[in-house]
Amino acid sequence: MQTASRFGALTIAEVRLTPILIADPPLLNTQGVHQPYTPRLIIEVVTGDGTTGVGETYGDTRYLELARPLAAALPGHGVSDLNGLFTLAERVCGDPAEVSDSVDVGGLRGVQTADKLRLSIISGFEVACLDALGKVQGLPVHALLGGKVRDAVDYSAYLFYRLAAHPDGQDESDDWGAALDPAGVVAQARRFADTYGFGSFKLKGGVFPPDEEIAAVRALAEAFPGQPLRLDPNGAWSVETSLYVARELGDVLEYLEDPASTTERMAEVAAGTEVPLATNMCVTTFPEIEEAFTRKAVQVVLSDHHYWGGLRNTRELAAICRTFGVGLSMHSNTHLGISLAAMTHVAATVPNLDYACDSHYPWQTEDVITRRHEFTDGRLTVSDLPGLGVALDQDALKALHQRWVDDDGSMRDRDDAAAMRKADPDWKTPSVPRW
Ligand code: GKR
Ligand code: MG
């Protein structure tokens, strides 16, 4: 328990929640296509001495419904009492109205559960508290997590099949153009490599029939010989198809990510191939670890502080993976610079982060921080400034919030299938296995 005064530097005096909509390009995945705007939630935690810490997480309606009661309950809570934050969230958040056993499109991250939604909200608050605590104490977030074990964190290029423009004509257009075949994917990868120096490449698959995606990965292997490649169809394939792809690409893949959609299917695939299987779909919470690890269904877990419940839980996940000899990588969804700072701080503290991390960041043209992160040689330098080392751009935050206010409701919840129906009115979320 905190002993600081209610109005002291270590006590939360105010919490501000700002839902925003950020521009997102027409990236394709097995569910559909990204909408022109995607929701995020920016959390500001202000301590008794006026220090502000910032956090970022999912901003869809069902997340906001959980965030609001937590924000209201936090004033008076110690900013360093992060264990207490979890207890408080369990008490005040309740269960979200709509939790189904369908795949969570807002992340293609396995089945939706109330726990996962709650943890995704807690993580944004935890990051904001750590940022505030670091600023109060003059320490970077990585120091609050035990200290960095590396000065820079490697990221991989996150390649997507994509359209040139959004099907509904709403366009915060960019100049990337379409990428719908092997040549388009290689051109995209070339630009990522030239601009940011990325040395490893992940292709989001599950969009085209497997042979087309195999051809794209082969083209990447020819264009970037010896460089690590990954393919992730978000569980779109049957066990047979997964094994076929593993055979075709076994010599060039660093890992195959979520070829099949359940732990059971992943275990069957793993039993039939030497290619390591990675996941951010069948191991997404602590209770899912035991079955997947005992059945040797996955060889690499993609951590994500948003849905594992924060930076400290990410380190706990890392320790479990280390114990069981399972590799660790990092997953990403559409996010802004606050989340990238948080990802980089925690990644810097994990000794067994064996792979370059995923990040959607290069696809985002907007941000709520005053200085965008810059990748050099595919890496980000770990900040030693107090807290996360980022400053909130209040004008940008206001403008992106206004977009959320003005929205007719159609963009406030991520819905890749709805966006796809603008191009193809008959489009339905494909059932899995799709191929
Ligand atoms: O943003 O389309 C996307 C991705 O497919 C994302 O939703 C996934 O969560 O990138 C993710 C993944 O690795 O599965
Ligand atoms: Mg994935």
Image (cartoon, rainbow, N blue to C red):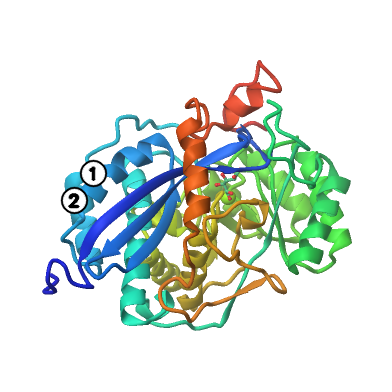
Q: Nearer the viewer, residue 125 or 415?
A: 125
Q: Residue furthest top?
A: 426
Which residue does the image show at 31% across and 81% down from the upper left? 137
Q: Secondary structure at mark 1?
A: helix
Q: Position of residue 89 (x, y in %)?
A: 23, 51
Which label is found at residue 309?
A: none
Q: Quadrant of residue 133?
A: bottom left
Q: Nearer the viewer, residue 226 or 362?
A: 362
Q: Nearer the viewer, residue 382 or 368?
A: 368
Residue 321 can be seen in this image = yes
Of the 4 image quadrants, the one containing the N terminus is: bottom left
Which label is found at residue 73?
A: 2
Which label is found at residue 69?
A: 1
Position of residue 75 relative to residue 3, above or below, is: above
Q: Position of residue 79 (x, y in %)?
A: 24, 67
Q: Position of residue 286 (x, y in %)?
A: 35, 56
Q: Is residue 362 left or right of residue 48?
A: right
Q: Secondary structure at mark 2?
A: helix
In contact (CB < 8 Å): disc 1 and disc 2: yes
Q: Nearer the viewer, residue 271 or 183?
A: 183
Q: Is residue 250 left or right of residue 111?
A: right
Which residue does the image show at 67% across and 63% down from the upper left? 156
Position of residue 359 relative to residue 326, above or below, is: above
Residue 199 can be seen in this image = no
Q: At label 1, which amino acid type do we have?
A: Pro
Q: Position of residue 68 (x, y in %)?
A: 28, 43
Position of residue 255 relative to residue 38, above or below, is: below
Q: Quadrant of residue 202?
A: bottom right
Q: Residues within 10 Å of mark 1 (few under 14, many from 20)?
A: some
